[in-house]
Amino acid sequence: MISLNKDNIYKFCVFYGTFIDTPKLGQVRIRTNTSIGVCLEGAQCGTIQFIKEDSENPLEDAKEFDSSLTENDIAVVDYYHQSLNSTSFFFPGYVDTHIHASQYPNAGIFGSSTLLDWLETYTFPLEASLNDLEVAGVVYQKVVQRTLRNGTTTATYFTTIDAEATKLMGRICSAAGQRALVGKVCMDSCSPDYYVESTQESLESTEDVVNYLQEELADPKVLPILTPRFAPSCSRDLMKGLATEARSKGQLHIQTHLSENVNEIEWVSSLFPECESYADVYDSCGLLTKKTVLAHCVHLTPEEARLVQRRGAGVSHCPISNSSITSGECRVRWLLDQGIDVGLGTDVSGGHACSMLATARQALLVSRHLAMKEPDVERKEHVKLSVEEALYLATMGGARALDMESSFGSFEVGKQFDTQLIDVESEGSNVDVFPWQRSAFVSSAKQSVSKTLPPPSITVQDVLAKWFFNGDDRNVMKVWVGGKLAHSL
Ligand code: XAN
């Protein structure tokens, strides 16, 4: 529950309860009875100011942190004591590193297609239709609401080639309070005549969108991202022009697709015979940077992986998409072992779900499929992703892939408060927690039901796993982005 003052205007907010995050790959950090203080005004607005564990009084914690704050200045968000079930906790908002907002109406529609015929049959016609701003507005509103209610606080969006509809998407994200990187798609080659631009049009409309987002919309939560669709739909001149644009504006983010499907890879090598590899096409145009996020990377060669690692680019692993349109199984552990930053992408509508929790589940299962094919017994275990690792990929991994880990992805002083409140036992929850299982969260919960054999005790990690495999948006009670409420169930 939230304590309110009479004007409902606060300078500071303290969130109280159990905070769970995954600051490092494989590590889960559980902090109970904890206060996190967030500034709500000025240059520090939305930023975590203090974290106090073993706290009893969140209001006192805030006053102790800043003695100039009065009780009227401080909102206290304490669902833990006052209204929710004991198995509720704060968790970092998800970072969706790859989602095509414009393809949302096709979520679930892909038949038995694979990448190149899927693009021709389903995707290009839909994207082209979104140059009608009214249609684009309806679709973009819906996808932003849907991702927020699933706990996504940062999304890296592809829109379409249409500049005005892309600006509209920027406004929609800003109004909804979602953190977003918004990219106008660039395509001047090998594209249908109803959905293509000239090189000059593509570069000019990209610059128009970048200027609009940076100078007119000017919402620090909504950033431009340059978006050459993929090598087959971009000429060298276009890719080089975009790299120049990125550098000239102090290194903007860049997103594209890489090595998703074997037919695509063959096509790229026939289009760019002078390049050593698919990754080298991008590198030779200056597109591989620390601020580049590369979707898929299913079939990278060892040389390409080394190149991606050297350039510091991040990978967006899109497991639902890769299974749905049968692109392949991305070797996530192999990428991580080489020091490549990997995040997760829903890749709507190659992927059918806006949910990052569903995407994280699929990432775990795809890693198990790779393990089943691994002949070496030790490596078999190694390639499997754990629940904690999949949750890391969905949060910190994504923040790192975007080179934004200093801003969000975990609970640290100085980071933005981008957070979900999860209630494992919310009304209508798909997760059943039995009374004795609550003892993992609350020591006073009943330990046994009078039987000769007590039920097996479980840990917080076990409850987390029950939520990971069975939870959905019904467990996402609230979502804050930069300390501001952006979704409430
Ligand atoms: N390559 C792509 N891959 C994908 O999953 N979705 C797309 O829209 C796309 N375009 C090129």
Image (cartoon, rainbow, N blue to C red):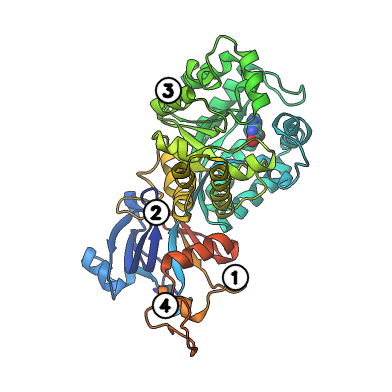
Q: Which residue is mark 1?
A: 429
Q: Looking at the image, which residue is at 44% across and 85% down? A: 446
Q: Looking at the image, which residue is at 65% across and 22% down? A: 233
Quarter where residue 373 is shown: top right
Quarter that holds the C terminus:
bottom right
**Marks 4 and 2: in contact by CB < 8 Å?**
no
Marks 1 and 2, Cα distance to the nearest angstrom?
A: 24 Å
Q: Position of residue 67 (x, y in %)?
A: 21, 66
Marks 1 and 3, Cα distance to the nearest angstrom?
A: 47 Å
159 or 336: nearer the viewer: 336
Q: Is residue 24 left or right of residue 88?
A: left
How many residues crowd mark 4 within 10 Å: few (<14), some (14–19), many (20+)?
many
Q: Which residue is mark 3?
A: 247
Q: Nearer the viewer, mark 2 or mark 4?
A: 4
Q: Which residue is mark 2?
A: 22
Q: Quadrant of ligand 1?
A: top right
Q: Position of residue 256 (x, y in %)?
A: 56, 30
**Marks 3 and 1: in contact by CB < 8 Å?**
no
Q: Which residue is mark 4?
A: 439
Q: Amino acid at mark 3?
A: Arg
